[in-house]
Image (cartoon, helix red, strand yellow):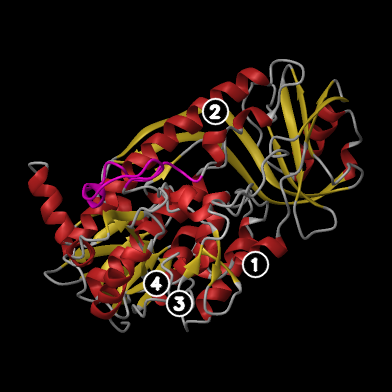
Amino acid sequence: MSASPTTVLIVGSGPTGLTLAIDLARRAVDVTIIDKTPQFPRSSRAKGPNPRSLEVLEDLGVVEEVLAAGSAPLPMRKYRGGVPIADAAPFADAHPTPDAPFGRPRTIAQWRLEEALRNRLATYGVRVGLGRELVGLAEGEASVTATLADGGEIEARYVVGCDGGHSAVRKLLGVPFEGKTDETQMMVCGDVEVRGPDRGFWHQWFDEDGAVMLCPIPGTQSGWWFQAGPETDAAGVPVPPSLESFQRLFAKHTGLPGDLLSQAALLSTYRVNERMAERYRVGRVFLAGDAAHVHSIAGGLGMNTGIQDAYNLGWKLARVASGQADPALLDTYEEERLPVAADVLDLSAERLRATMEAIKKPGGGLDTAVTERTTSPGSGYHWSSLARLGRATSRLRAGDRAPDAPCRDVATGTPRRLFEAFAGPHFTLLGFGAGTAPALREASAAHEGELRAYGVDTGTAHGLADDDGHARSAYGVEPGEDLLVLIRPDNHVGLITPAGDRQAVGEYLRAAALERASARHGG
């Protein structure tokens, strides 16, 4: 049993794999995505996308569906001895700003997010192949042959493992998954039906020997996420999760009747895992998401880091597969994303320790896990070989996330955000000031189809007007300064250069930037 050859085979259809599939499909890359499960899971452990992931989802064209299906983060109500003692709203002061359109995360069941992503992927004619388990990988000179449990084979130029913490791809590659599993920090979780608690809060009952947490699942009338420390038997051995066990834990820690809780589903046990793959690439095979890194749940960073892995890898795979860039571009995926995962692992571990200490005290709760670092758009890729050329401004340097800003379309007079200009599978060249007009025309003509150029306050009949100065402020462009800013397809700054340096943009797009950066840094 065989399958038609494909350019990219994605193993795993969670948020990471689906994000990557959409990003490749919209670039007209032939992509196949498979999953070993016989049907789409209704898992909902991840609580939803953070502000940076919402920016990614906006670019992919699914953010409106996600926003409609989800809800804003709820305030947290904390209890001791069954009595409410404190409320916390860690996102109460988080609001959109001109440079960041999503001020707070969105709460949505993971299965609903995956459904939205699958719907978007289907618009490109791509659907997930269910019940297709990977059991073998063999790399040849120009392709990889993936063997499936049913005897079928798929030949692909590249393979990406997005198949979770127990990744078959990672194991077949023999890539070490270094780190630890804390057997002492264990949780049971599931989706339950509950009558009684106010659905306007994420309820958190803490006491000396355990905890129960209930968070309403958006889009349901009585569905809740249930988390608790495990019930143990007389010998101190954790009892497997079940409806009856959940009812006993609920009654014990809340003081409410256990039969208020019913219809427990998706029962699972969770241990704190902190692990990271030693490598993200072996030849033509890549790892992304939980296949490459797993974190503690504190801060809600796991799924979001995976989505952003995919967003980083997608445009690079597409450019190399289409012959637009040297294969060396693919090395920058590990170079950029592995340090991010290491930082996230440290951050989530630190937030878990802080939260575990906080809940020992009255008024402490899961809000301790939320900090500016867990919700910020990220610090970018300053260390990358793709960020070593050009100059910096007072606000930005190459490798930074490119900010948003409200502008006005000069030709139509209608409002237009920078993110709307960036949206799509292309590079974007912003020219600040009238002196950039010749460079914009030249770059647009030379790189038609892969680059879109926009003048900001160039004085021409086309382009964007920065009436309120938000764009110049966000990009650190001084009054009267003429500056070119090249934005990568993953909405990070690739290059900042004076208007007179017209060759720099072309060199970057040809990946000559890799060679020049390597030479300058002795690499």
- Residue depth check, mark 2 versus mark 4: number of the one nearer the observer: 4
- For marks 2 and 4, the one nearer the N-term is 2
Amino acid found under the numbered disc labelled 2? Arg
**Contact check, label 1 and label 4, Cβ < 8 Å:** no
- Dot 2 surroundings within 10 Å: few (below 14), some, or many (20 or more)? many
- For marks 1 and 2, the one nearer the N-term is 1
**Contact check, label 2 and label 4, Cβ < 8 Å:** no
Q: Which residues are magenta?
A: 377-397
392 falls in the magenta region: yes
Amino acid found under the numbered disc labelled 4? Pro
Residue at the spot 23% in from the left edge and 78% down from the top edge: 446
**Contact check, label 3 and label 4, Cβ < 8 Å:** no
Q: Could you give the CA–CA distance between mark 1 and mark 2, rounded to whole angstroms?
A: 30 Å
Question: Which circle marks residue 64 in the picture?
Answer: 1
- For marks 3 and 1, the one nearer the N-term is 1
- For marks 3 and 4, the one nearer the N-term is 4
| Residue hosting label 3 | 462
| Residue hosting label 2 | 351
Residue 13 percent across, percent down from the top left: 48, 64
Which of these two is toward me, 435 or 191?
Answer: 435
Amino acid found under the numbered disc labelled 1? Glu
